[in-house]
Image (spheres, rainbow, N blue to C red):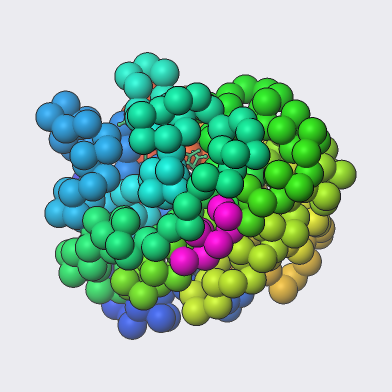
Amino acid sequence: MQNEIQENNGMNVRARHAVPLSDSAFLKACRCEKTPFVPVWLMRQAGRYMKDYRDLRDKNSFLSLCKNPSLVAEITVTAQEKIKADAAILFSDILLILEPMGMKLEYVKGDGPSLLVGAHGRAPLRSSADVDGLKNVDPVKSLPFVFEGIKQTRQRLYSAIPLLGFAGAPFTLASYMIEGGSSKDFSLTRKFMHEDRGRWNILLKKLVQSTISYLNAQVDAGVDAVQVFDSWVGALSPEEYRDFVYPHSKELLESIKRVPVIHFGTKNSNFLEMFSEAGGQVIGVDHRVSLADAWKRIGPSKAIQGNLDPEILLTDLATIKKEVRRILKEAANRPGYIFNLGHGVLPQTPVENVIALVEMVHEYTP
Ligand code: 1CP
């Protein structure tokens, strides 16, 4: 079984990665170059669906895992090796940067993240004074565990596997600060935005400045590409995206120059062109848009990443295979394609299905 798994597509795992890192299928696809197989990795590939992670999590809080570079490296590398993904993503979280900006960050069991203003957590971000009080982050000083985690991961990861760093996009980060945590309708965020455009712009500028320093410091520490997650941008109308978010995302995305940038969003298919224009060499699309349509609208100069519905991984292997084939057919051997999900792996996903999915993508490739 193991041999069978390793030798799909006439290539064993070593052969697949017996190239210098810069010629890895993932980095080639980011540059829209032809690849010998379709590279695949999964958002949230290191996480609660994996027993190895749950075992570590039983003994440690989520934040203490994120702040321990040796465990960060272990979780990142274990996930990549277990599922044989063609890239690893650093184990961390988009919300960590909000702590040194002056927010109290907690992960409450069952309720998700909580974000409140001030060291003692007064209330969610609401006023101009709250915005004015936010600090610009010097990431090397305030998030040293992230960069040490990158260095240790790079040492432990197979040398030809690219390592991705990441950050939240300014809209998605602002939404957690204003809502005080996760949200379904983002109504407080949109109210905040419409009520006082000046205050909104100051907030987003602060987030952009800190995130530029943060991502550049990740590149200095050794990541090979970065992904910017605008996970909740689909809450906006096209006009709201254009007026309140696009200029800020553009400034962030254009400021990261040394590695490929993946710009990911969900539920944004009615303003995908604008989202793509904001920046990123690779556009991450969700499962609510077809790849063929996304390509027409994004154009041939950018690579595309996506877009299997994560719920499909909760079904059976035959269904997964059917969907994988459909998506790969739509990708049609186009250079500049990275297989991924439309959003992150769900916690209840069977790990065998994830392993099988990666194999199916590798096998299918002509
Ligand atoms: O309880 C636990 O064990 C914590 C669960 C967990 C994990 C494993 C959280 C809390 N974050 C993470 C890791 C994480 N988060 C990674 C690295 C692992 C990997 O991808 O393999 C990454 C890239 C993220 C990014 C992240 N965090 C995003 C963007 C991706 C997405 O899913 O849209 C978002 C929105 C967050 C916020 C967050 N972190 C954690 C929770 C519960 C939430 C809230 C999610 C929500 O609002 O629905």
Main SS, magenta residues: helix
Residue 54 left/right relative to 200: left
Ligand 1 is found in which quarter of the picture? top left
Observer-nearest residue: 255 or 99? Answer: 99
On screen, residue 10 above or below 23: above
On screen, residue 201 above or below 189: below
Q: Quadrant of residue 150?
A: bottom left
Residue furthest right as drawn: 239
Q: Is residue 63 magenta?
A: no
On screen, residue 37 above or below 77: below
Residue 330 left/right relative to 73: right
Q: Quadrant of residue 224?
A: bottom left
Observer-nearest residue: 197 or 176? Answer: 197
The segment highlighted magenta reads 206-213
Q: Residue at x 69, y 63 (%)?
A: 250
Q: Position of residue 180 (x, y in %)?
A: 52, 27
Q: Residue at x 56, y 53 (%)?
A: 207
The answer to whether one can see residue 269 in this image is no
Q: Residue at x 37, y 17 (%)?
A: 110
Observer-nearest residue: 235 or 145? Answer: 145
